[in-house]
Amino acid sequence: MVEPSNSTIVLSIVVPIFNEEQILPELHSRLSAAAQSITAKYEIVFVNDGSRDHSMDVLKLLASRDERVYYIGFSRNFGHQIAVTAGLDRCRGKAVIIIDGDLQDPPEVIPQLYSQYQEGYEVVYARRSERKGETWFKKFTAKMFYRVLRKSTSIDIPIDTGDFRLIDRKVVDALKLMPEQNKFLRGQIAWLGFRQTEVLFSRDKRKYGKTGYSLGKMLHFAMDGITSFSDKPLKLVTAMGFTISFLSFVIILYAMYSHFILLRTITGWTSLIISSMFIGGVQLLSIGIIGEYISRMNKNILNRPLYVVDSTNID
């Protein structure tokens, strides 16, 4: 175990890692250079989120060569947001940088974030002005997600921003008081308030490997964001229920009027099946939305640990 230094850490860099063995040496070099341009009292905390390659071996090698490198290895894959949370739990810096480990977020932006921090801001987030190397589908869905999320919540969540940001120690301490299982850190940080500002940057394309965020994971992440900070889906379900009930009542009145007054009974197998399928689909959608909220409540009630650490050099 590496004993934490008694000297005050000025800057911590938290990096979630998942199958990034090829990029880790360059990542470490660029992060170290960015941190050294700010202070000599820094630490880099890598969180290995159950990688299936040799990322953990590379991290241990880097830690043996650089006393400022710390690692946390999970027992399995717990997810990106949980990995970041683990790093925030263990880091010690007065200011903390959160950055992904694929080098799409360039470490060279870190001094700009710190410069704004010195101006008195407690949260400095990096906003993407350009997304290189990404498909039109990824750009379109990401753009729609941020705008739908902003419209559906009462929290001012910055658009076109990921988790790449600098946060003050008081923000880290406040995040530790938010124990929900389905983490959505950028929303939680926005909810906390404090003085916030942005730095524009151009996001680079991925150099090695493939992204660990599949379409399914992105949809799950979007659902976490919306259900964690908005009850509008539940209100939508209620509105649909009232609307369909009203339309059904009108149709029943019309059917009775047609049968008893006009003496013309409404028939039609097709219309019956279509209406039944429509109402059934709305019911299943409503049950699914309600189930998502109940599922998240159940996870919090179970109160299981967010993650399990397999190995670390942080005492």
Image (cartoon, rainbow, N blue to C red):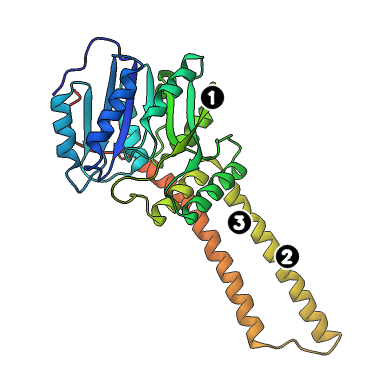
The vertical placement of 285 against 100, above or below, is: below
Per the image, label 3 sits on a secondary structure element best described as helix
The vertical placement of 269 against 146, above or below, is: below
Per the image, label 1 sits on a secondary structure element best described as strand
Q: Could you tell me which quadrant the N terminus lies in?
A: top left
Dots 3, 2 in contact, CB < 8 A: no
Q: Position of residue 46 (x, y in %)?
A: 26, 32
Q: Residues within 10 Å of mark 2 (few under 14, many from 20)?
A: few
Instruction: Tell me the residue that label 3 is attached to.
Output: 237
Residue 249 visible (yes or no) = yes
Instruction: Tell me the residue that label 2 is attached to.
Output: 246
Q: Position of residue 153 (x, y in %)?
A: 59, 41
| Corner quadrant of residue 84 | top left
Q: Which mark is residue 196?
A: 1
Q: Residues within 10 Å of mark 1 (few under 14, many from 20)?
A: some
For the view shown, which residue lies furthest in the top direction?
7
Residue at the image point whose x is 64% and y is 82% from the top: 272
Marks 1 and 3, how far apart at CA:
34 Å
Q: Position of residue 188 (x, y in %)?
A: 48, 33
Report the mark closest to the observer, 1 or 3.
1
Report the mark closest to the observer, 2 or 1.
1
Marks 2 and 1, how far apart at CA:
46 Å
The vertical placement of 127 against 144, above or below, is: above
Dots 2, 1 in contact, CB < 8 A: no
Q: Earlier in the sequence, mark 1 or mark 3?
A: 1
Per the image, label 2 sits on a secondary structure element best described as helix
Q: Earlier in the sequence, mark 2 or mark 1?
A: 1
Q: Position of residue 30 (x, y in %)?
A: 30, 29
- For residue 43, side relative to residue 223 (left or right): left
Q: Residues within 10 Å of mark 3 (few under 14, many from 20)?
A: some
Report the mark closest to the observer, 3 or 2.
3
